[in-house]
Image (cartoon, helix red, strand yellow):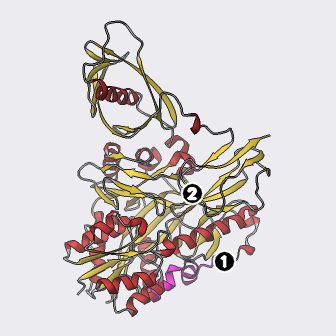
């Protein structure tokens, strides 16, 4: 019987596994990098072991250090979570060789399916493994990491001239995320549906197929919104998934993924681990997949038939990122995160935690379950809209608009959804009264509710705010009766609450301020100084770091004085396990290049200056 579990992972999935372990009376053990020393998963565990360093390669990808930590902490078993070493057969063997229980499939099954190239061969599908085989007729193709998942190490190539660069970037990204730089090339099927089947198998020959999930809404090949069951599909995929599991004598939880296009299901891969989106299956089937993983690892048999599915569940991944700026990840303090009752929130953060640069920017997963799909979608969209999220920029507005988009509500979405609709979904639509509410709340802290008025007429007070990249100026007056503003009636103005009335309708604005950052209901604003600081001004053509990160590559031969073409890659910035390409905005001369390979930069740091011709 398992009495203590070490989770060889971090963040949300570690906290998720710990939750079930606590319910079962199992002792929990965390591992953490130096960057995660104060992370929620390290604080929640009964014991925690430090992995010296910050990068994944030095910490969460060091199987030897994790096994050593498990033995030192007295763990009975190791749960790999997802990502990192979760699909590494050598790590699974090392855990077993140390006398520990591996809460996952046999290393042989991991080995057979964890490499996407070998998995395809097992299923009778031959990928184009040699880039030299790719011709114009094959385009578009997908460069894909052989190990891992989560969209890491993937690039779509539509022009043969871009293939070498895509291979280089994919290998670097895969090595950073999974410790394995193997990549392959396969045909890229445009605008199909990404559908998967959850399986669970025991050591007694029983294999459950726990319904389908649709994961078609993706950015950078990483899922954003998932649901179960996949709308409009029949259960034929269950048989294919069970066949894949039996082909490798699978044990434990796993997922078989397909791309459904032109009425056909194309096998993509088998993930030999728990998936990020497993909560929607749990909600529909009324089960705890982590608890079932523990039971299977202890040798217990599953029931002959899986439980019945009930209702519909939808999950949205909340990321600290700016979808309108190329999905740029964001960092900083998460001051507050809360969703309405009735919504499941799986997260690796709590109020006051810092979001750093070293790992994936996912803050949480919000899950709604209801008797019908329409009810579940409506419930989740409404909950996200009312959620309190104070901190860095997030994709919350994108999620709400996606869930309410006609293409999604009608179940007609595919993997090209964001390619078609991103511009509309990220179009700025801030509340026009939010800047005024922020200004009135600020004024109430400095003058009191009825202070600051003058007997003689005077000009209005002026405040400026940046909202979604645009500047807004608001004006208000101090009068004998309090604060006033043209066109609205100020019912109440306190530091944390402003009530405004327009056309006989009163609206309530909850205010929270953190330095120069102000949150007014769901709108985030930045208070601007009255007089701009000249030191913060940059020359025309300046390229600034869109996020904190490390310069990992500079274009070959690039120096100050080089002539560059518009769109030409200048350097590559790595942040949160993704490479971000910085390109020349115009054709001209590179007049400044103050950074080099290995340089760590903060968001807004000057990377280069290109002077236009």
Tell me what residue is drawn at x 34 percent, y 70 percent. 14
Residue 46 located left or right of residue 12: left
Start-end of magenta stretch:
108-130
Look at the picture and state if 43 lies above or below 432. Answer: below
Q: Quadrant of the N terminus?
A: bottom left
The quadrant in which the C terminus is found is: top right
Predominant secondary structure, magenta span: helix
**Nearer the camera: disc 1 or disc 2:** 1
Label placed on residue 129: 1
Horizontal relation, residue 202 to residue 34: left or right? left
Marks 1/2: CA–CA distance: 23 Å
Q: Is residue 541 above or below residue 320?
A: above
Q: Residue 191 — which label?
A: 2
Is residue 110 in the magenta section?
A: yes
What is the x, y in percent for residue 348? 35, 62
**Mark 1 residue crowding within 10 angstroms, few (<14) / some (14–19) / many (20+):** some
Question: Where is 3 relative to 595, above or below?
Answer: below
* Residue in view at x 34 percent, y 18 percent: 488
Pinpoint residue 479: horizontal percent, then vertical percent.
Answer: 30, 13
Which residue is at the front of the view, 53 or 67?
A: 53
């Amino acid at each position: 019987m398992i009495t203590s579990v070490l989770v060889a992972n971090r963040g949300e999935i570690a906290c998720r596994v710990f939750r079930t372990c606590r319910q079962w009376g199992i002792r929990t053990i965390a591992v953490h990098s130096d960057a995660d020393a104060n992370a929620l998963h390290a604080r929640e565990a009964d014991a925690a072991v430090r992995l010296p360093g910050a990068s994944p390669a030095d910490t969460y990808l060091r199987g030897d250090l994790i096994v050593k930590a498990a033995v030192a902490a007295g763990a009975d078993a190791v749960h790999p979570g997802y990502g990192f070493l979760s699909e590494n057969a050598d790590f699974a063997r090392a855990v077993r060789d140390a006398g520990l229980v591996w809460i996952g499939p046999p290393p042989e099954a991991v080995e057979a399916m964890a490499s996407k190239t070998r998995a395809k061969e097992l299923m009778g599908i031959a990928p184009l493994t040699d880039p030299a085989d790719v011709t114009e007729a094959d385009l578009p193709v997908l460069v894909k990491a052989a190990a891992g998942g989560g969209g890491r190490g993937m690039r779509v190539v539509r022009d043969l001239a871009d293939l070498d660069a895509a291979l280089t970037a994919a290998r670097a990204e895969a090595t950073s995320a999974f410790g394995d730089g193997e990549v392959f090339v396969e045909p890229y099927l445009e605008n199909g549906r990404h559908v998967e089947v959850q399986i669970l198998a025991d050591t007694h020959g029983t294999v459950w197929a726990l319904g389908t999930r649709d994961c078609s809404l993706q950015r950078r090949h990483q899922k954003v919104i998932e649901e179960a069951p996949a709308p409009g599909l029949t259960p034929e995929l269950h048989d294919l998934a069970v066949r894949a599991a039996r082909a490798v004598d699978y044990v434990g939880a796993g997922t078989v993924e397909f791309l459904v296009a032109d009425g056909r299901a194309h096998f993509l891969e088998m993930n030999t681990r728990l998936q990020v989106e497993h909560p929607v299956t749990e909600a529909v089937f009324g089960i705890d997949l982590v608890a079932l993983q523990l039971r299977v690892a202890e040798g217990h048999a599953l029931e002959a038939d899986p439980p019945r599915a009930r209702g519909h569940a939808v999950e949205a991944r909340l990321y600290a990122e700016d979808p309108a700026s190329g999905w740029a990840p964001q960092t900083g303090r998460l001051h507050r995160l809360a969703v309405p009752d009735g919504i499941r929130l799986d997260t690796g953060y709590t109020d006051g935690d810092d979001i750093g640069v070293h790992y994936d920017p996912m803050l949480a997963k919000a899950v709604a379950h209801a008797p019908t799909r329409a009810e579940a979608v409506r419930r989740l969209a409404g909950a996200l809209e009312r959620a309190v999220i104070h901190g860095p920029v997030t994709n919350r507005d994108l999620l709400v608009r996606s869930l309410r988009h006609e293409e999604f509500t009608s179940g007609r979405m595919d993997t090209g959804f964001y390619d078609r609709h991103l511009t509309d979904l990220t179009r700025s639509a801030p509340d026009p009264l939010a800047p005024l509410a922020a200004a009135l709340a600020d004024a109430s802290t400095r003058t009191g509710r009825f202070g600051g008025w003058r007997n003689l007429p005077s000009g209005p007070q002026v405040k400026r705010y940046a909202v979604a990249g645009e500047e807004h100026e608001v004006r208000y007056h101090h009068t004998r009766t309090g604060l006033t503003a043209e066109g609205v009636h100020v019912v109440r103005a306190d530091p944390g609450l402003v009530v405004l009335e327009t056309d006989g309708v009163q609206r309530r604005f909850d205010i929270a301020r953190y330095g120069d950052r102000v949150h007014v209901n769901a709108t985030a604003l930045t208070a601007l100084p009255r007089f701009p600081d000249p030191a913060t001004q940059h020359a025309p053509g300046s390229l600034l770091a869109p996020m904190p990160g490390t310069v990992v590559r500079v274009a070959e031969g690039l120096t100050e004085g080089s002539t560059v073409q518009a769109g030409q890659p200048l350097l590559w910035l790595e942040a949160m396990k993704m490479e971000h390409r910085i390109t020349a905005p115009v054709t001209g001369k590179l007049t400044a290049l103050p950074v080099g390979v290995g340089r760590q930069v903060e968001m807004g740091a000057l990377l280069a200056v290109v002077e236009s011709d």
